[in-house]
Amino acid sequence: MDLRQLKYFVQIAESGNFSRAAEVLRIAQPSLSQQMKNLEEELGVELLLRHARGVTPTEIGQQFYDHARRILEEVERTRDVVRSQSQNPAGRVSVGLPTSACRGLSLPLITAMAERQPNITLHIVEAMTGYLDDFIQLGRLDVALLYDHKAFEHVAWTEMMVEDLMLFVPPDHPVAAQGGISFRDMFALPIVLPGAPNVMRTVIEQFAARHDVVPNAMACDSLPAIARMVRARKALAVMPHFAFSDEMERGEMVAVPIVDPTPSWRLSVVVSQRTMNPRGSEAVAKVMADVIAEMVGAGVWLARLRGDRARPETLRAAAR
């Protein structure tokens, strides 16, 4: 068994068809079929079920696929370690972006990386912040943008800014004409928040506890679904201004300030110290911090930058 056979098997399993896999791999289909026959004979098991529509992995074939995929990913990450030791950062860097920021930040980040670090390949992962926090701590992500992240010994961070949370309502909603709504009065309305363990839910519930407020709210972990609920007048959403900037530009929503008191959260660029491409990860973190600061400075992203964010490349260790 060799890495080439693993690569071939993974591609066949994902393509579901020998001919499509052969096209992607740019090899002759008979040669590919022979390689899989040799692999199955060596292992003494049937890895693929052949049928009229193509092929599907057997039960043991699916297990083999999972292992093969991880092996190939580790090989690629090992290559990145070597590449990252060159003078210019290079290789693949996985970047986690929270759902509330991914739509607005991904394109500016990709554009800036292409201009400033063309040798780095980004793999962007969108998820709710709570999941990204776990991924970065486990080393499954190299860099992430997190709200009120957990302190952990295997991450370092640059705290960027503070965002106030706002109430999003349809433009014809009675609250839309108000200059603001109190945090307590807000929960007399139908509110939707992401569910636990999402950081948004935690921030609101902890903030409510400090001010003797019962935060009655529905739970939904899909930002598009939350947007649809607001447009359909089924619920009102609590989010940072940046989350629904597209909807506001189209006139579908209005952001109403939450006052007396105003909930907020901190935003940080976080780097996993378990990354196998430290130079590339630090380069991405710096570009991300610069892009965010530029967007805040231009008024595209409504937030308050930290005054000490003069050198975003300086990462403060989480454990002191």
Image (cartoon, grey):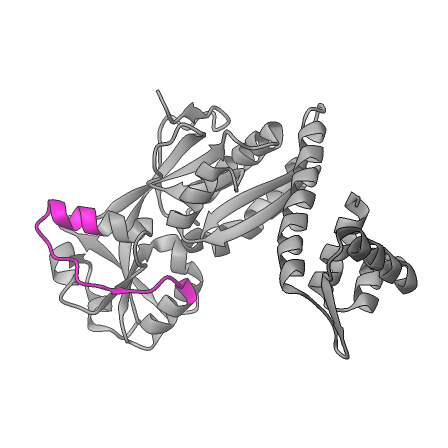
Work out whether residue 262 can be spotted: no
Q: Nearer the viewer, residue 120 or 71?
A: 71
* Residue 169 percent location from the top left of the image: 28, 68
* Residue 232 percent location from the top left of the image: 33, 77
**Residue at screen point 28% across, 76% down:** 233
Q: Nearer the viewer, residue 138 or 97?
A: 138
Q: Nearer the viewer, residue 95 or 304?
A: 95
As drawn, the residue found furthest toward the top would be 320
* Residue 266 percent location from the top left of the image: 33, 40
* Side (left or right) of 58 relative to 278: right
Q: Picture quarter containing residue 282?
A: top right
* Side (left or right) of 303 relative to 311: left
Q: Which residues are magenta?
A: 205-224
**Residue at screen point 32% across, 56% down:** 239
* Residue 271 vertical position relative to residue 112 in the rendered view, above or below: above
**Residue at screen point 49% across, 53% down:** 126
Work out whether residue 31 can be spotted: yes
